[in-house]
Amino acid sequence: MLTLRGKPRDLGDGFRVARLLPQIEQRAVGPFVFFDYFGPVEFAPGKGIDVRPHPHIGLATVTYLFEGAQVHRDSLGSVQAIEPGDVNWMTAGRGIVHSERTGPEMRAAGHRMHGIQSWVGLPTKDQEVEPSFQHVGKADLPVKREGGVTLRMVTGEAFGLISPVKVFSPIFYADAQFEPGASLKMCDKHEERAVFMVAGTIEIDGEDYAPGDMAILGPGEDITIISKDGGRAMLLGGAPLDGERHLYWNFVSSSKERIEQAKADWKAMRFNLIPDDHDEFIPLPDAK
């Protein structure tokens, strides 16, 4: 079993995250090609997150919060606040631009932010689909309570639960909250699997995991997750993608040429812009 710990990254404007995927030791888990964990972080009144408009291709972004809230806007015209327990799934496909910002009321009051943004690679046949956006509220995600563990299925299918979020390949992404002393047998229906610790501690095969740790499970490995102190973890994985994926900045594709085209398109501002948030943007990293 491999253990990953996040590498610090600054996404700009002072917003720092811990990047779990990709790393040299592990490029992906199932279709999850990117996994950023942020917080808990305190924002004083007047401060907040401002992830300025930026583009994506060839992937779906998945946002899930434990604390705080933020507002998603995109070039389709979507405007959606996300709160803890909700899920935002944005399919970039052939190209989309979005921003994520703290809303005015929360910014004025001060707040804590804590959550995860992950990217799911799309199968080759779906890399150029029309972009789309889905929001599913916490109350509409399926939940199961059993043996002191509460499971909420964010996307995909596992543990007898099926999320209503439309996905493109076999995947699962679940929020597991443990009562003290509870245990959970990890599902074995998916080819690649991982456990990411959010709060408290868990034990897997006699090894302890703390918040920010990700355990990569071996193929077919039969494991039970135990939490003595009432921890919280995200369980994730699925089928690997159908071939190699190239990552550059916010772009994912099986084709290097397609990424070069996306870079040129963003430099020339050929992407559609966000109707109500287009006065600023994040430039391509190598732009001069």
Image (cartoon, rainbow, N blue to C red):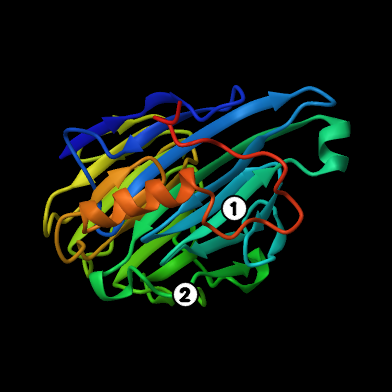
Question: Within the image, what quadrant is residue 213 found in?
Answer: top left
The amino acid at mark 2 is: Glu
For label 1, the SS is strand
Residue type at mark 1: give it.
His
In the picture as drawn, the residue positioned furthest to the front comes out as 268
Q: Quadrant of the N terminus?
A: top left
The C terminus lies in quadrant: top left
Residue 172, image quadrant: bottom left
Q: Is residue 266 above or below residue 81?
A: above
Q: Residue at x 69, y 25 (%)?
A: 42
Numbered disc 2: secondary structure = loop
Q: Which residue is drawn at 40% across and 58% down?
A: 57
In the displayed structure image, the side of residue 214 where residue 243 appears, left or right: left
Eyeballing the image, is 172 above or below 45?
below
Q: Which numbered disc flags the more N-terminal residue, 2 or 1?
A: 1
- Few, some or many residues within 10 Å of mark 2 (<14, 14–19, 20+): few
Q: Position of residue 171 (x, y in %)?
A: 33, 67
Which residue is under mark 1?
98
| Frontmost residue, 116 versus 259 | 259
Tag 2 and tag 1, C-beta contact below 8 Å: no
* Residue at left offset 36%, top offset 58%: 120
Q: Where is residue 71 in the image (x, y as percent from the top left)?
A: 71, 50
* Mark 1 residue crowding within 10 angstroms, few (<14) / some (14–19) / many (20+): many
Residue 281 position, x and y percent, is 61, 40
Mark number, residue 130? 2
Q: Estimate the spatial distance between the alpha carbons at disc 2 and disc 1, rounded to whole Å.
A: 15 Å
Please say whether residue 148 is visible from this viewpoint. no
Tell me, yes or no, if residue 37 can be seen here: yes
- Please tell me whether residue 117 is drawn above or below residue 173 in the rendered image: above
Of residues 285 and 44, the one drawn nearer to the viewer in this rendering: 285
The picture places residue 125, in percent across and down from the top left corner, at 26, 76
Q: Nearer the viewer, residue 211 or 106?
A: 106
